[in-house]
Image: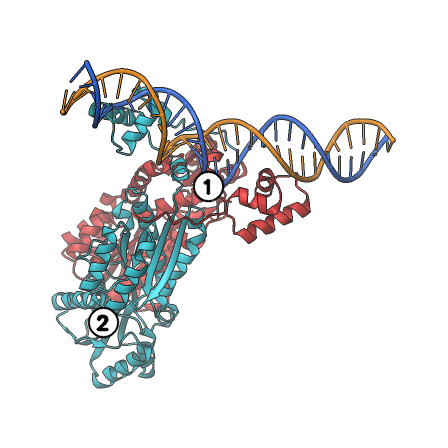
Chain colours: A cyan, B red, C orange, D blue
DNA sequence: AACGAAATGAGTTGCGCACCTCGAGAAATT
DNA sequence: AATTTCTCGAGGTGCGCAACTCATTTCGTT
């Protein structure tokens, strides 16, 4: 093994000695506790800066003796994507437990503002922080704001509540995601003219409307030869989506592209395969699952727009931990990118 | 604030009491130290499992009192991508310092096996772990193996040395990256016939050859109408690449695509712009920089294949820390994806 | 049966910090 | 001048664990 390469780290004691005060005073300054003259505060702070003192995380953590409880509030009917987020949270549990941190996951009907609000009010205060897949609704916003007011850290996950006082949003920019899908479809179509159909889960969900806004904009500006159809709602359901897609294919011989805004991609894929149009209709959807992965491999789908569930879970946890410990966050690190996945870069 | 939600964590003491042994014995079992009867070991282990005991990271860290030193060995002439990795390492320094961890960055000529080997031999043993941007060469491999033998943790970064005993490779699958680039070019060309030119830095670098292998395969199988030209080496240099690209454009009226395998994208972009061909030649390159970002925005480039430098730096550090502390690593978490970036999903 | 060596156990110390008490001196107020 | 308030030093305690010392037991060997 290597020689112990001690960094000769400066400790509280060093700072106290150098500043000519007691450890207690340094501690008071460090935690903005009252009872220290301004001049002394300044002197101590100067010494801290000069020595480059940083409290050692391990010692602070141990002495503080606090434990932390976080909770992920997820949709009751977990689709594959949500299930993967949850799975990653579970995976991190052991690691977190060694750091006195407990994570729960509760499921609720996040599409029902009343139910979600009730859940938040019921359990929110039992935790130090919450990651919420939230509906953007005034009542939900109020519930979040109340929790923040009560000192609970809140981050929104996947779907944002922009006007609330949540500390962070962990997820992608859905307008940009829609733009990305539109641009890929436009380019993959390869100069042909025709219609592009859009199937959504529900236009009451802000992420779905955002994505439609995105594709509308890019189609209007970059691909004037393509006609974007109005979105049809299939409630993220495979069967419903299959029916919708089959009708779209039958009724529109000039269909050149399909964009599935939400889940239920398997149904659309089945309809395309049934119609024997897998080769010439460009098909782009969201979220990498067993289905979309297979569709990419067999060439039925052309691209999947995805946000990495593991990264989102990890990022949410990291942010909650930092917030609870009042540590700084570097927002650039926490940006969730819009992943474009084609057959060739499948992870 | 919330009531202190103690997780009532089990401690060493609890385990000792429950198992009817002393703390010291539990400690011996925990660290496989000798001097405990087999039956006792079993009893203690059973108790640990039953109580779900996990050593608290903070306390262990503090008691261990060790500090850690890591070093990033980077190319001397930093291109933008490498500089960004370095920047992220610097950014994490404060956080790491609070965890008794020091990170250095040294620059060396990683393309010169002798120089790189010497650097590794010189400084390697001063550290607990190294992240190396390495040339795949027998001497380098031997140097890495020697370090591993001596107990230094080694991960390769961006460019792998597959046959060495390095613990991990942090970077992308470059064959897949080449395939991805090829597939995008093929599809963006939109059915036209013609030639696709390839400009590389040096075919002595394994990541560059790998990428060429990738694009060759996908072109051969998926796009028979396109003729892939042999790669021309421009040493990742803007001026050289500009000359090369200008000649390619002039001499090949049927040029429909350019793939830049390495750096020096700005030169190629300039040549394309000069020739007034920015619209109809599909141009794909690597790594998101100020140049490639601008090219994407003005439509001169069609896509950038990228590996996220921040993520790579972070991942390398995380792996080194886990290795040094003998903590488990979840490989799935550490996979670096191949990012496809077009104008619409620019971060 | 006697002896040394190995096996096993109990107890102790200290890591660096947060948080607490107590009391002395200084400054401000009455 | 008496009182209150502010400022600050001194000191202690304990967080949970790693790592150590030393006492005791067990065992194999002579």
Q: Quadrant of the C terminus of chain A?
A: bottom left
> Do the residues at discs 1 and 2 belong to one chain?
no
User: Which residue carries the number 1 mark?
Assistant: B154
Mark closer to the observer (1, 2)? 1
Viewer-proximal residue, B323 or B157? Answer: B323
Q: CA distance from mark 1 to mark 2?
A: 46 Å
* Residue located 22% across and 70% down the image: A190
- SS class, disc 2: helix
Viewer-proximal residue, A280 or B193? Answer: A280
Query: In which quadrant of the rendered view does residue C22 lie?
Result: top left
* Residue located 36% across and 57% down the image: A310
Marks counted in the figure total 2
Q: Which mark is residue A282?
A: none
Could one spot residue B157 in this view of the protein?
no
Q: Is residue C23 left or right of residue A136?
A: right
Q: Is residue B252 left or right of residue B93?
A: left
Residue B142, given in percent of the width and then of the height, sits at 51, 39
Residue B65, given in percent of the width and then of the height, sits at 46, 32
Rendered view: B230 above or below B66: below
Q: Chain of mark 1?
A: B
Query: In which quadrant of the rendered view does residue A257 lie?
Result: bottom left
- SS class, disc 1: strand
User: Which residue carries the number 2 mark?
Assistant: A189
Q: Contact (CB < 8 A) between labels 1 and 2? A: no
Residue A214, given in percent of the width and then of the height, sits at 18, 65
Rendered view: B171 above or below B33: below
Rendered view: B29 above or below B120: below
* Residue located 58% across and 44% down the image: B17
Viewer-proximal residue, A274 or B282? Answer: A274
């Amino acid at each position: 093994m290597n020689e112990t390469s001690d960094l000769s780290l400066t400790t509280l004691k060093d700072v106290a000695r150098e500043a000519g005060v007691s450890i207690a005073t340094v501690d008071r300054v460090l935690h903005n506790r009252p009872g220290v003259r301004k001049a002394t505060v300044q002197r101590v702070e100067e010494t801290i800066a000069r020595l480059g003192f940083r409290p050692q995380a391990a010692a602070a953590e141990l002495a503080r003796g606090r434990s932390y409880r976080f909770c992920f509030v997820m949709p009751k009917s977990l689709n594959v994507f949500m299930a993967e987020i949850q799975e990653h949270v579970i995976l991190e549990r052991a690691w977190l437990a060694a750091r006195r941190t407990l994570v729960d996951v509760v499921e609720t009907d996040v599409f029902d503002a009343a139910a979600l609000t009730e859940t938040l009010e019921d359990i929110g205060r039992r935790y130090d922080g919450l990651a919420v897949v939230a509906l953007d609704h005034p009542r939900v916003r109020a519930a979040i704001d109340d929790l923040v007011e009560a000192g609970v850290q809140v981050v929104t996950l996947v779907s944002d509540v922009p006007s609330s006082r949540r500390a962070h949003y962990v997820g992608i920019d859905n307008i940009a995601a829609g733009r990305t899908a539109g641009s890929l479809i436009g380019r993959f179509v390869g100069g042909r003219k025709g219609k592009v159909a859009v199937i959504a889960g529900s236009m009451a969900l802000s992420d779905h409307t955002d994505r439609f806004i995105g594709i509308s904009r890019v189609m209007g500006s970059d691909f004037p030869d393509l006609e974007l159809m109005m979105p049809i709602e299939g409630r993220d359901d495979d069967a419903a989506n299959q029916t919708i897609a089959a009708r779209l294919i039958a009724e529109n011989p000039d269909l050149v592209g399909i964009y599935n805004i939400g889940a239920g991609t398997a149904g659309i894929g089945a309809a395309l395969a049934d119609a024997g149009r897998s080769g010439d209709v460009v098909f782009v959807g969201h979220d990498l699952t067993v289905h979309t992965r297979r569709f990419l491999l067999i060439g039925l789908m052309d691209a999947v727009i995805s946000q990495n569930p593991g990264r989102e879970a990890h990022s949410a946890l990291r942010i909650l931990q930092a917030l609870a410990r009042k540590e700084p966050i570097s927002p650039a690190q926490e940006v969730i990118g819009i992943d474009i996945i084609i057959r060739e870069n499948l992870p």
